[in-house]
Image (cartoon, rainbow, N blue to C red):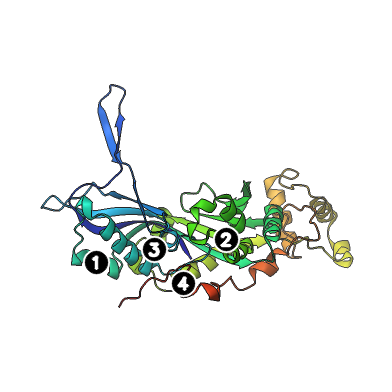
């Protein structure tokens, strides 16, 4: 699912669109620079999306050719984001139409060329969030999974996760991309007013309780590196393929053990490192960096990753690998054909 988009749309308009202006002054009180504040537009579900004018460019007639937009188009159009569309082009097209209708009073005059440019994918992207959900039996199972993952999971090039308010982050402050894992049901129930589309719908809330949500945030530098900063370079499968690629960077350890026969054949130094690891010690603090990585390389041959610190795991914790090898949660059949699931219109 596309959970967030920040993009610069071709969108001709007369007056600068914003919610005011922030002026930055230097030490002498002189105007150093200014920036427009984001204007929020609300849809039929009272969920909003932000927009503001790109001031850096003007047409010869004084109109502005581009408009920035940032927010969750899925939530804008269906009132919640427990599930939603993975159609980037369709969501951008529908967002364009929504803006054109909502900004008439601000002199919005999007041209046919603007519309065709959006359809062709001539839209600059600086952030895209991709999400998938995996179904577990209950909200408590989702929370237990995340607690276990805090100690048994690492991500390539990101290391161990960082737990904040029940959400497990990998690369939280990265300028390129980050991953976060959380219990969707917990998020929905803590901020139910932000999900008006499913307010009071018990079956939808029960479904959310089962959702273990894994979300990747791709920022401008990473989109640019991949050539995905232009919407036209995305096809129907790009979001799904990219999510799976980043998901594959997660590495799991489930208290794997070495058989006694193999253990006896290991050098004493490795047996000692293995014993300390089993007891839950952080071996990075025990050994020098070169020794740690030498031992890690040697023990990986036996399925042991000492970079993932061991912790006792309650019997009721759902095994991590088994969940992630499951098929991602599909959109409920009962949501199709209703206002609970917004499907962008297709265009040639």
Q: Crowding at label 2, few (<14), some or many (≥20) Cα neighbours within 10 Å?
A: many
Where in the figure is residue 78, as x and y percent of width and height? 44, 63
Earlier residue among tags 1 and 3: 1
Q: Are marks 2 and 4 in contact (CB under 8 Å)?
A: no
Task: For mark 1, give the secondary structure.
Answer: helix
Q: Which residue is mark 3?
A: 228
Q: Which residue is mark 1?
A: 115
Q: Quadrant of the C terminus?
A: bottom left
Where in the figure is residue 59, as x and y percent of width and height? 15, 53
Real-space Cα separation, disc 1 to disc 2, in angstroms: 33 Å
Q: Which mark is residue 338?
A: 4
Residue that sits furthest to the bottom in the current view = 348
Q: Which residue is mark 2?
A: 214
Q: Crowding at label 1, few (<14), some or many (≥20) Cα neighbours within 10 Å?
A: some
Q: Crowding at label 3, few (<14), some or many (≥20) Cα neighbours within 10 Å?
A: many
Task: For mark 2, give the secondary structure.
Answer: strand
Where in the figure is residue 346, as x and y percent of width and height? 35, 75
Q: Is residue 131 above or below residue 30?
A: below
Foreground residue among 204 and 131: 204
């Amino acid at each position: 699912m596309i959970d967030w988009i920040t993009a610069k749309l071709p969108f001709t308009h007369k007056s600068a669109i914003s919610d005011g202006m922030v002026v930055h002054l230097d030490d002498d009180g002189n105007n150093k620079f200014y920036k427009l504040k984001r204007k929020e537009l609300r849809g039929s579900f009272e969920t909003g999306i932000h927009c503001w004018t790109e001031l850096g460019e003007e047409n010869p007639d004084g109109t502005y050719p581009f408009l920035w937009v940032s927010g969750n188009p899925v939530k804008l159009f269906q009132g919640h984001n427990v599930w939603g569309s993975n159609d980037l082009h369709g969501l951008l097209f529908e967002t364009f139409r929504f803006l054109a209708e909502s900004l008439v009073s601000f002199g919005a005059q999007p041209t046919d060329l603007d519309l065709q440019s959006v359809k062709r994918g001539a839209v600059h992207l600086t952030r895209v969030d991709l999400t998938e959900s995996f179904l577990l039996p209950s909200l408590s199972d989702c929370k237990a999974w995340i607690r276990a993952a805090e100690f048994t999971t690492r991500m390539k090039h990101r290391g161990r996760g960082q737990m904040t308010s029940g959400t497990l982050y990998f690369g939280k402050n990265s300028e390129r991309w980050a991953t976060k894992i959380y219990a969707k049901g917990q998020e929905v129930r803590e901020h139910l007013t932000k999900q008006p589309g499913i307010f009071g719908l018990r079956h939808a809330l029960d479904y959310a309780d089962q959702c273990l949500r894994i979300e990747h945030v791709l920022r401008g530098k990473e989109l640019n590196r991949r050539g995905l900063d232009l919407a036209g370079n995305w096809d129907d499968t790009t979001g799904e393929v990219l999510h799976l690629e980043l998901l594959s960077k997660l590495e799991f350890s489930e208290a794997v053990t070495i058989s006694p026969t193999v253990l006896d054949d290991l050098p004493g130094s490795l047996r000692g490192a293995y014993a300390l690891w089993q007891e839950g010690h952080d071996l990075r603090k025990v050994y020098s960096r070169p020794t740690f990585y030498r031992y890690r390389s040697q023990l990986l041959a036996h399925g042991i990753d000492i970079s993932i610190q061991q912790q006792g795991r309650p019997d009721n914790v759902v095994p991590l690998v088994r969940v992630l090898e499951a098929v991602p949660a599909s959109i409920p059949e009962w949501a199709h054909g209703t206002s609970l699931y917004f499907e962008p219109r297709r265009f040639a």
